[in-house]
Amino acid sequence: MAGLAQKSALSRLVNGLKREPHDFRPSLEVFPALNVDKLAGDMSLAKLGAERGANDEPATDSATLDDVESRVVEYVEAEKNAAHGLLLDELRTYKERLMALDFEGRFGAIRQAAPAAVSEFRAEAAQGRDELHSLRRHLRDLELERDEFQRRNKLKRTARSSSGGSLTLKVGILLVLFVSEVFLNGFFLAKGNELGYLGGAVEAFTFALLNVGVSFLIGVVGVRELNHRNYFRKLLGLISLICYLALALGLNLVLAHYREVAGSLVSDAGREVLIRLRTTPLAVTDFKSWLFFGLGLLCSFIAFADAFLIFDPYPGYGGLEKRRKMAHDAYIRRKNDLIEELLDIKDQAIEVLEEANRDLSVRRSEHDAILEGRSRMVRLFAAHQSHLDRTVNALLSVYREANKRARTTPPPARFTSPYVLEKVPIEAELVENSARDDLRRSITESQNILAGQVQAIHTEFERAFASYREIDHVIEETPVARAYAKAT
């Protein structure tokens, strides 16, 4: 279920999110102003005006600009063209930045990916429900089997089973008994053994395995059948109990005789024990041998009783209940895991959708900043053209005033008329601003889509959570009712 950022429809939103702003540096002085005094000095306008005025140039009837005036106008026109070129470069940069925002691509990804995210979440929830249905049906079958077992065997109690610390304690008791039996048998049987304590330990291990291990197995497999309602199985349990008593008494009596015989250094101890058992089975004269006999019986009885504490007394009931409990635990554990997975998917999806919403706000702010910067650039250029218009007339005025003072003839009539600098039209360079309102509406609609899908994912999660919790009621329970009806 993981990996939304790589596999799901939300990846298209993740990949399109703006991570860094554009790298640009706005200039504080895009169109620098011209210094009239410096230009007039550099071009020697006053000097040239006086020299030409002394020669009464240009003529009084002159209608066109003379060489000096033309040079002034050409200089200012060159400045105007350079500023216009800079304006075009700036407008081109603004246009590229507007295109890089790619609103249409983002709108398309949101319209496709946002609803798809809800569909994918719904599909994940449905898959989880199918899995839980299967686990719940298996649990239901085991519950039916247990109920039928209780009905058939007339059991009105729950199964007794050991687990956790209780099971550890009971198994530990069994192991302690076995080790203690080996140690005690080795201590007593070492007397007279050719190999000493090593030989006694080997014999002790064999006798302890028979005394403790076989007692436990007979209690688990055989004697518990006494609790069964079937009479044939009860008979098997009774036979097992008789066999156990015979084994426990006989084996420990053999051990007692074996200790006495082995201690007397008889060459064939095993044959001597068999003779004693046939002739005088109770003729054990050493008190330690009787103590050995009693300790062996005690260990055997404890191991026998431990079999009834570890497993349920009724044969088959504990194992059936254990399988039902394992299925129940697996069902609950998987249900919780699926809920956690859905919660993670929901959080990831909502995070992506909210990030896409914030991204639209960032793009909208940058779009407004770009339009404002572009408008400011246009205003600056318009102001610069007005400045150039004033500059060219100021420069011409310096030349003409000096010319008029030095003349003996009237100056040309055009000296009294200001020069009109031809303005560069800039409206054609701009993108229409009327689309701004449409863009804002589209952004708002997309953000509403994202907010709606976030709410839809919340709703789907609540629905999925409720459906997971209600699977117990969804699973058909008719077989249970039919079983009880049949029993009645």
Image (tube, rainbow, N blue to C red):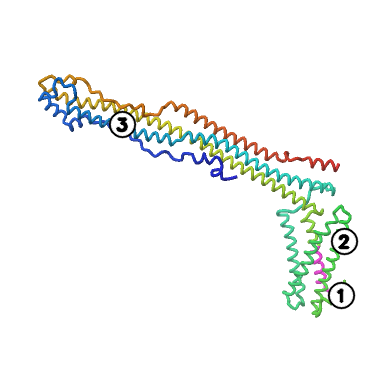
- Name the foreground residue: 273 vs 221: 221
The part of the image, by quadrant, that contains residue 388 is top left
- Residue type highlighted by circle 3: His
The reply to whether callout 3 and callout 2 are in contact (CB within 8 Å) is no
Q: Main secondary structure of the magenta part?
A: helix
Disc 3: CA contacts within 10 A as few (<14), some (14-19) or many (>=20): many
In percent of width and height, residue 308 lies at: 80, 56
| Secondary structure under the numbered disc 1 in the rendered image | helix
Q: Residue at x 73, y 54 (%)?
A: 166
Image quadrant where one finds the C terminus: top right
- Residue type highlighted by circle 2: Ile
Q: CA distance from mark 1 to mark 2?
A: 27 Å
- Residue type highlighted by circle 1: Arg
Residue at numbered disc 2 = 239
Q: Any magenta on residue 289?
A: yes
- Which mark, by number, is residue 276? 1
Earlier along the polypeptide chain: callout 3 or callout 2?
3
Q: CA distance from mark 3 to mark 2?
A: 116 Å
Q: Nearer the viewer, mark 3 or mark 2?
A: 3
Earlier along the polypeptide chain: callout 1 or callout 2?
2
Q: Residue at x 85, y 73 (%)?
A: 284
Please indicate whether residue 469 sits to the left or right of residue 144 in the image.
left
- Name the foreground residue: 129 vs 234: 129
Q: Looking at the picture, does residue 472 appear above or below residue 365?
A: below
Residue at numbered disc 3 = 84
| Secondary structure under the numbered disc 2 in the rendered image | helix
Q: CA distance from mark 3 to mark 1?
A: 130 Å
The part of the image, by quadrant, that contains residue 276 is bottom right
Segment tinted magenta in the rendering:
283-300
Image quadrant where one finds the N terminus: top right
Q: Looking at the picture, does residue 32 appear above or below residue 198?
A: above
| Secondary structure under the numbered disc 3 in the rendered image | helix
